[in-house]
Image (cartoon, rainbow, N blue to C red):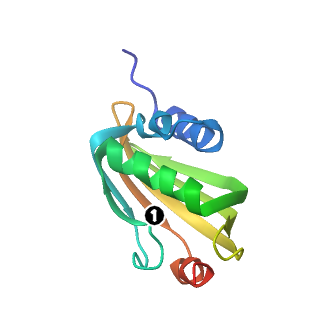
Amino acid sequence: MTVKTPQAVAETFFQRIATAEDVNEIAALVSESVDWLVAGNTQLVPWIGRKYGRKGVAEFYSQIRSHLSSEHFEIKDILIKDKRLVAIGELASRVKKTQKLIETEFVLDMFIDNGLITRFRMFEDSHAVSEACR
């Protein structure tokens, strides 16, 4: 098996987020012991928090799809140093329950080793996300 570069893994990851019908296709890109965290108010925002393994990542994307409609997702820049990849972007999502629009810049901080994402952090305006879910 050929080990993919962090750039290639990230590009595949972003493409699958946008196009994969089965969330397990996205989860296949993370290690079974992935350290996954999106900080915020887990009482108001059910999809955030710490997730465990591929099953947790699949659950994360399944929950996002059931609660949000994506209106815009754009990666503006990618920075890579060794196994660390940082993606800077912006997104807009509509909360299905409230019809409120979340517009935020974000940073994804990932470690990619042997072709799999082993650590994932998403930094965004978590206050705005929580408010949109009220």
Identify the image quadrant of residue 43.
bottom left
Q: Horizontal placement of 98 versus 25: left or right? A: right
Identify the image quadrant of residue 107.
bottom right
Which residue is nearer to you in this view: 102 or 21? 21
Q: Horizontal placement of 99 versus 119: left or right? A: right
The C terminus lies in which quarter of the figure?
Answer: bottom right
* In the rendered image, the vertical position of residue 47 relative to residue 29, given as above or below: below
Residue with the most extreme front position:
97
The N terminus lies in which quarter of the figure?
Answer: top left
Residue 67 in the image: state x and y as whole percent: 58, 63
Residue at 50% in and 51% down: 61
Residue 19 in the image: state x and y as whole percent: 65, 38
Q: Kindly identify which residue carries mark 1.
A: 47
Residue 53 in the image: state x and y as whole percent: 29, 46
* In the rendered image, the vertical position of residue 105 relative to residue 79, given as above or below: below
- What kind of residue is marked 1? Trp
